[in-house]
Amino acid sequence: MRKSVIAGNWKMYKTVTEALEFFSKVEFAGKTDRVETVVCAPFVALPALVQETKASGIQIGAQNMHWEEEGAYTGEISPSMLTALGVTHAIIGHSERRAYFAETDESVRLKTRSALDHQLTPIVCVGETLEEREAGRTRELVREQVVAAIRGLSSEEACRLILAYEPVWAIGTGRSATVEDATDVIRFIRKSVADQFDQQVANEVRILYGGSVKPDNIQSFLDTEEIDGALVGGASLDPSSFARLVEVAAQRGDLG
Ligand code: PGA
């Protein structure tokens, strides 16, 4: 059985002090061994959060990284800078980065490759805009994004991936995809992975849903075997709502 993942994406929210405050208010004990629980925080908060969460089983992730080891790339952060801190995950190709910071399928591929080379778990985001969905292009687009990201990986590397299906129109809008739509696209993503590698790899890759996931709708997504967890923005900023998301996912582990 694939281990469920709850990953918070804090985006550009919380100072270091606020980030530490979050963890002083939240109790995850006993749940994080059943759920891969990750908080992807702004770069400046990463060192403090890795220290703060050491004994908790919570893992700390970045929201982006450069693919090079080092170099003249003003303003960028390298994968080895992250691993040196104890960071374990990195979100790659979030739609906000694709839309506002010119991330392309090619930069997503380079970053995914580099994260895996550095033993970081990439959480690779894919998803269509509303316009693309309405034009009936969801599958085509999502497949393109997935194939671009995993091209050239070995089967062993592909198994370490986490993919996140995040329809752009569902992010931060309060309008989540229906469970049926999310399941349908995620099943299709798994098939795309199987076509690139084989069924065994496809069975191991974790695929999350993201887009307006909240404590009151997460259960319905996790009721579907196909969906391995959630990438959560807004609802991950509040300690009690994030703890609730982890709790629901942990109960799922109990049933499995
Ligand atoms: P949201 O964001 O949960 O606030 O919709 C999800 C994301 O951007 O990863």
Image (tube, helix red, strand yellow):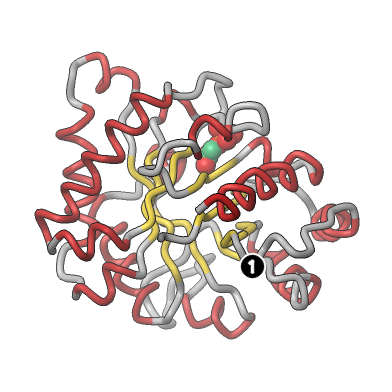
Say left or right for 223 vs 185: right
Say left or right for 59 vs 49: left
Crowding at dot 1, Cα within 10 Å, few <14 / some 14-19 / many 20+, comes out as: some
Farthest residue to the left: give it.
195
Of residue 135 and residue 221, the one placed in the foreground of this image is 221
* Quadrant position of the N terminus in the picture: bottom left
Farthest residue to the bottom: give it.
84
Q: Position of residue 154 (x, y in %)?
A: 19, 75
Q: Is residue 64 above or below residue 95?
A: below
Q: Position of residue 21 (x, y in %)?
A: 88, 55
Farthest residue to the top: give it.
134
Per the image, the residue denoted by label 1 is 33
Q: Is residue 176 above or below residue 69?
A: above
Q: Point out the quarter of the image occupied by ligand 1.
A: top right
Q: Is residue 205 above or below residue 134?
A: below
* Residue at image location 65% in from the left, 57% down from the top: 41
Q: Is residue 238 above or below residue 167?
A: below
* Residue at image location 30% in from the left, 68% down from the top: 159
Farthest residue to the front: give it.
255
Give the amino acid type for the residue marked by disc 1 in the picture: Asp
Q: Position of residue 205 (x, y in %)?
A: 32, 60
* Residue at image location 26% in from the left, 77% down from the top: 156
Q: Which secondary structure lies at badge 1?
A: loop
Instruction: Give the image quarter of residue 158.
Output: bottom left
Of residue 89 and residue 190, the one placed in the foreground of this image is 190
Of residue 150 and residue 57, the one placed in the foreground of this image is 57
Q: Position of residue 6 (x, y in %)?
A: 57, 51
